Image (cartoon, rainbow, N blue to C red):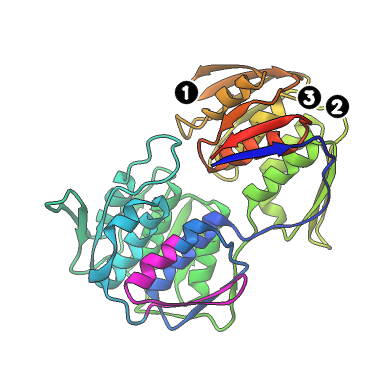
Amino acid sequence: MLMRMRGGHHLRGHIEIGGSKNAIFPLVAASLLIKGAVTLTHVPRISDNERLLEILIGMGARVNWLDAHTLSIDTAHIDPTQLDIKAMRRMRASILLLGPMLARFKKTVVPEPGGCIIGNRPIDEHLRSLTALGAQVETDSDGNVEMHAKELVGGYVIMRFSVTATENVIMAAVTAKGKTSIRLAAAEPHVQDLCNFLNVCGAKIQGIGTHDLEITGVKQLHAPKEPWTVIPDTNEIGAFAVAAALTRGELEMSPIVPAHLDALRSTLTQIGVRQELNVRRGTYTVQGGGRMEAFKLQTMIYPGFPTDVQAPFGLLATQCQGTSLIHEPLFESRLGYINELIKMGANAVIADPHRVVISGPTPLRGTEIRSLDLRAGATMVLVSSGFIKIDIFLKV
């Protein structure tokens, strides 16, 4: 698909931030563990979530949209033999079914899932960590991975700061026998959201928000009495913040969780972008128009700067005074969008698969560019519809 866009406008107004894309997937997966219908609100209407729901529906789950962003899921009568392996292979988020399926049925099959092209993301960490709870791993005749266990038993799990693997182990451990200690656990906001949700459902998880989790297994989980509200998408906030800075506009955003914005706000302060956080009103406002200074940015595990917001800041660097350095240690292919910016006139040098040097400010020109992954695609939309007045053609 080819999109034609023309920008050159100051963006102003109020933005309603949607539910977190990264949070909705583990919450949907966790519904497999819960007795009764689960109601989720502030749910983002995105195609990947629809695909994940279709996998559950294929096994017999009852899924209903109560309104535009409120979802009811009842997995009481699903048939695990109807798990669609081909559908799982097409989307990376389906790996999050591994932990809850193993916990509930003591057996499941998982292919190497697909997803955005941002580097090597093997499932070995998921398999290794779940074997610490007593699961065994085999490969079937089709090359798919089979996991099974007579019983999941709490254990001592040392992670490698993998977010989705941490979420899988959490979901497997909440109903495992005994206690589970997870060290070097991911602590991203959506991991915290999953843990808080599971605790409301009767789980016993301690250490939420830290890299050390202690989980005492329970026999079963129950549906929460009230609908669970998905946290706002910090990555969406980051993209709109960059949009305000680039277009010399002013955007107010809500809802927000102030603690989730620390790394974003700190980096924008370093650049010189004006911001206002109003905790009482629950709003975050970003105002462009001032001089923007070059910066150094390194993506890190939470609470460091999120890798999913790195690409928009790479674009922002092209309009800052001086030379910026961006270091992306988490994924080796996430700087591919820089080549698209170079086509448009950006003064950037990719030093190696993890580092790029960008000098600015540099005027960018219209041309045909590509969207390589979700976050790079958002960046290309920003450059296309933001501060450039001429036509840009975006291939997605």
For the point 70% across and 57% down, the residue is 17
For the point 45% across and 42% down, the residue is 116
| 68 w.r.t. 185: above or below | below
| 379 w.r.t. 362: above or below | below
- Given the image, on which type of amino acid does mark 2 rest? Arg
Compare marks 3 and 1 and give the one earlier in the sequence: 3
Q: Secondary structure beneath disc 2?
A: loop
Compare marks 1 and 2 and give the one earlier in the sequence: 2
**Residue 174 seen:** no
Residue 104 placement, left or right of 254: left
Task: Identify the mark at residue 293; answer none if there is no mark.
Answer: 3
Viewer-proximal residue among 219 and 305: 305
Q: Secondary structure beneath disc 1?
A: loop
Viewer-proximal residue among 81 and 214: 81
- Given the image, on which type of amino acid does mark 3 rest? Glu
Whether the residues at callouts 3 and 2 have beta carbons within 8 Å, the answer is yes
- Crowd tier of the residue under label 3, counting other residues whose Cα lies within 10 Å: few below 14, some 14–19, many 20 or above: many
Residue 31, how many percent across, how many down?
Answer: 43, 72
- Residue 7 is covered by the magenta coloring: no
Residue 133, how many percent across, how many down?
Answer: 27, 60
Span shown in magenta:
51-75
Whether the residues at callouts 3 and 1 have beta carbons within 8 Å, the answer is no
| 77 w.r.t. 145: above or below | below
- Residue 60 is covered by the magenta coloring: yes
Task: Identify the mark at residue 353; answer none if there is no mark.
Answer: 1
Instruction: Please give the residue where the numbered disc 2 appears in the rendered image.
Output: 291
- Given the image, on which type of amino acid does mark 1 rest? Pro
For the point 57% across and 35% down, the residue is 299
- Crowd tier of the residue under label 2, counting other residues whose Cα lies within 10 Å: few below 14, some 14–19, many 20 or above: few
Residue 146, how many percent across, how many down?
Answer: 20, 57
Q: Secondary structure beneath disc 3?
A: loop
Q: Distance between the residues labelled 1 and 2?
A: 30 Å
